[in-house]
Image (cartoon, rainbow, N blue to C red):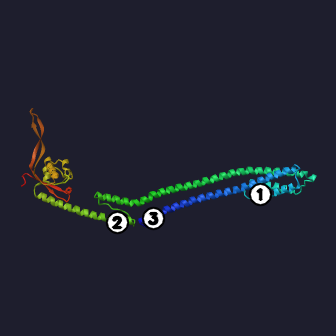
Amino acid sequence: MNLSLKKRIAASFIGSNLMVLIIGFTVFYYLNSLNKQIQSITSNSSQISLLTDEVRISAVSILKMQKKIISNKSTEDDLDKLNGLAEGFQSQLQRLDSFYTEVEVKKTISKMIGYVDSLKTLLSKVSLFNTKDKAGISTIGELADKILEAFSEFQDMQYYQNEQRDKQIKEIIVETRRYMLIILIITFLFTMLMSLVIPGKIALPFKKINDAVRELQDCNFDVSIYYNQDDEIGELARELNKMISSMKHFEELRTDRISVEHRKFDILASMIKKNVLLANADGELIYLNNQMYRLLNVESESVLKKNMEDTIIPPSITDAYKLALKRRSKIDNAEVIISHKIKSQEEDESGQIVEVEKEEEIFNGFANVIPIRAKESSGDYYLMILSEEMFA
């Protein structure tokens, strides 16, 4: 499915927002789950702590009352109070037992409940004014001590469980932190991937268009923008391809026209049977006719498209051109002398044969430089015609 550039950017924006929402909800879920677990643990721990405090108070009260009864300073009301404390203590232990699932803890609580049942049973039968019940009163003290001993054992277990609870909370926090860190890393990698892929996908067609325009600036018309998406960029690419095709066709026509004009100029230059040169406004040689090639004894590759000063063109010709370029006007009958260096063998004073290099003049005449005007002076051409006779 082909989407327009506008829709693709909108889809990318929507995708980014959805990613942010998913991350936000995921983080909220883990934070909420962490909060619920900690709240559940701390809530149970708070209730257990309150019940433990109540049990502790009841156990201490039972111990105090037990000591009072053993000291023979108690009354029948004290036995009733001790019985009431035992009933309340038993109720607290039963509620405390419902919060635990560990076998050892429940076993200890059941042991305390058993001692309390035994204490209640004994209290219902003991009388302070019966001398035969002294052994029963002594048994009350023993049961109270056993209750206190079992409660001390329970407290040791509870201390251990508090440590386990703190450890569990730490583990939950560490695990939640690990999950959140994994989510953040995945999110970061996904975001980096999207930041690399999406801008690249959007920028790639513009890079192709930019490369094609640079090729056109270098007059290379054998380029084409390949983009198969049916969107705004695709429409721009198709229109640019049409323009490149038109420019290529125009360049071919222009090249053919220049080639035709060049052949015409070559024919005309050959017909006048004169030595002809053509240079542009920068002093670069554009054309030499056959007679000129033969006169200078050069090849086209060594002179064409090069500045005259960088070639073996004789100084008298370059001087005439320099003057015409400087004045931007016609130069009449500039003296031109063309000579070649030749080597010959001669005898020196001692009679030995040596090689001697001499200048041999092959042309002595005149040159007319005629400017061919363009709309701008930088587009002017300068035609030079050589003749052994002075121009009229």
Q: Secondary structure at mark 1?
A: helix
Q: Amino acid at mark 3?
A: Ala
**Residue 49, percent from left and from top:** 72, 54
The answer to whether the residue labelled 3 contacts the one labelled 1, judged by CB atoms less than 8 Å apart, is no
**Residue 238: mark:** 2
Task: Using the image as rendered, state which of residue 98 and residue 365 is in the foreground.
Answer: 98
Give the distance between the C-alpha atoms of the residues marked 3 and 2, in whole angstroms. 24 Å
Q: Quadrant of residue 89?
A: bottom right
Tell me if 305 is positioned left or right of 80 in this view. Answer: left
- The residue that mark 3 highlights is 10
**Can residue 118 be seen from the camera position used here?**
no
Q: Residues within 10 Å of mark 1 (few under 14, many from 20)?
A: some
**279 or 135, which lies in front?**
135
Q: Amino acid at mark 2?
A: Arg
Mark 3 neighbour class, 10 Å CA radius: few under 14, some 14 to 19, many 20 or more: few
Quadrant in which the N terminus appears: bottom left
Give the labeled residue for mark 1.
92
The amino acid type found where label 1 is placed reads: Gln
